[in-house]
Amino acid sequence: MKYKTVLLFGAPGAGKGTQGKILGSVPNFFHCACGDAFRSLTVTSPLGKVFIEHSSKGQLVPDEPTIELWRQSIEGNTRAGRFHPEMDTLVLDGIPRNVHQAEMLQKTLDVRAVFYLHCRDMNKMIARLQRRALKENRLDDANLDVIRERLKTYDLETKPVLKFYGRKLVHNIDSTQAPVEVLSSILRHLVKK
């Protein structure tokens, strides 16, 4: 069975998590943030060690452990009755992170829309990440060099995923708007689906 899916896409700090949490509170939508799954790992677990090794340098975790963790998370949420694949739309945030991951998930995901939250002003994005680091105790967002490395990695590895899914599925949304305006733009597209 393929999961009916919408993707929240954008650079670190674009607002994917904020929008995902809101959409996840709507009946028949289930939000799955790959970053949250990684941050919930214990640092002594094999996957936790891999996550710390890469995230502390602003690098992406390799594809195979990322997909494995994602699958474990989805299966666990399905068993726990939080995600009902036959009824719910899966809202993904932070996965797929590159074209290879998108290819690995092609037989699993029925992607209906990609919401590309973009911000032209990188200084705003950096300021957002630093505020989030303080507010949510996210060490991966605190160091300016790590932030710059994450943004560079996003441009090189993640942005090409937009081309993979194609123009028909991708909806550009200005993430510098107020969160409620971003949500309104997303909902307008979802209502048309």
Image (spheres, grey):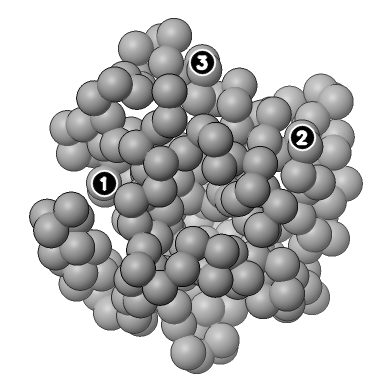
Packing grade of label 1 (10 A; few <14, some 14-19, many >=20) is many
Residue drawn at x 40%, y 73% is 167
Location of the N terminus (image quadrant) = top left
Q: Amino acid at mark 3?
A: Gly
Tell me the element at label 2: helix
Task: Work out how far the residue at label 2 is from the one at label 1, CA to CA, in angstroms.
Answer: 26 Å
Tell me the element at label 1: helix
Badge number at residue 23 = 1
Mark found first going from the N terminus, 3 or 1: 1
Mark found first going from the N terminus, 2 or 1: 1
Residue drawn at x 58%, y 78% is 126
Residue 123 seen in this snapshot = yes
Task: Work out how far the residue at label 3 is from the one at label 2, CA to CA, in angstroms.
Answer: 16 Å
Q: Amino acid at mark 1?
A: Leu
Above or below 83: residue 165 = below
Q: Amino acid at mark 2?
A: Pro
Badge number at residue 76 = 3
Mark found first going from the N terminus, 3 or 2: 2
Badge number at residue 66 = none
Residue 43 seen in this snapshot = no
Q: Find residue 166 and report its horizontal and vertical position in percent.
A: 46, 68
